[in-house]
Image: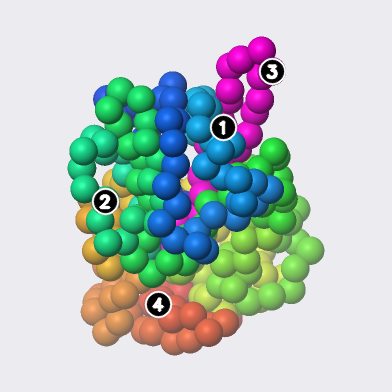
Amino acid sequence: MPELPEVESVLRALRDSTPPLPGRLIRDANILSNVVVAGDYSDVFNDVVAGMIFSTISRHGKYLIFRLIKLCSNPRELFLVVHLRMTGRLFLVPQEQAVVKHTRLALTLDDGLALRFDDPRKFGRVWLVDDPAKVISGLGPDALTVNQEIFRSKISVYNRQIKPLLLDQSFIAGIGNIYADESLYRAGIHPLTSSSSLSELQIERLHSAICEVLSEAVDDNGANIDGVFSEGDFVVSVYGRQDKPCPKCGSPIVKIRVGQRGTHFCPVCQPFT
């Protein structure tokens, strides 16, 4: 599943393309899947978005947030909130480019462009709402920008295994299985460790590891684990490397299940105490 770095790479690709998505006018919309669109205006999506302009793109956790505006005698502001889920991708392409089998939503834009939402497994969702909080209000702070003080204050109220806690989007938004394993490895913390047993130093080290891992992965356009993000260059240290040598000590990487998720760690560098 795309995690924060992969979603951020999609944001940057759309924002920094030539021409960029911000400023483009939506001429019409074509919904190609009856499950892809949700939100306040799902029944009248096409009519509502036609004539609106993409203003800004932002992200919170794994969610992309597109601000749409209509400049007329009665100005209007709406938000397109997108979650890619497992296999969703957004592409800004020439209008004449053929719609492919897995395209679920196609927006025809000005300047001869189109925005396509492709999703082979159909789990991705697009919400059109007046306020993005209707979709993302239950999320914790963004994992890439949360400061150490807030991270420490939030983690102190829990008594849970640290790996499932990092995956809980209401605790911190954006971390999935890949970057939870990589952050715990870099912090030297066993995934079964209780969050309430972490020392101040361990909490500080974990926060730093999360920020470092996510920042590096963002710079590398994410990780190409399953071929969905083929442009991703982030090199994992433990995730998916069962029985391969630890980059630090050479011990075999171990895989266990924690909270029903495959979890990779080094038993030497991440001792369970």
Q: In the displayed structure, would residue 252 be above or below residue 29? A: below
Nearer to the camera, 43 or 256: 43
Query: Which residue does the numbered mark 1 point to in the structure image?
Result: 67
- In front: label 4 or label 1: 1
Residue located 40% across and 77% down the image:
264
Q: The N terminus is located in which quarter?
A: bottom left
Magenta residues? 58-86
Q: Considering the numbered disc 2 on the image, is that residue within a helix, a strand or a loop?
A: loop
Query: Which residue does the numbered mark 3 point to in the structure image?
Result: 74
Nearer to the camera, 15 or 127: 127
Q: How crowded is mark 2: few (under 14 residues within 10 Å), some or many (20 or more)?
A: some
Q: Is the magenta stretch mostly helix, strand or loop?
A: strand
Going by the image, does 194 lie left or right of 186? right
The earlier-in-sequence mark between 2 and 1 is 1
Q: Considering the numbered disc 1 on the image, is that residue within a helix, a strand or a loop?
A: strand
Task: Where is residue 6? Give x, y as percent.
Answer: 38, 51
Q: How far apart are marks 3 and 2 (CA)?
A: 34 Å
Q: Residues within 10 Å of mark 3 (few under 14, many from 20)?
A: few
Residues at marks 2 and 1 touching, judged by CB atoms closer than 8 Å: no
**Residue 74 visible (yes or no):** yes
Nearer to the camera, 91 or 58: 91
The earlier-in-sequence mark between 4 and 1 is 1
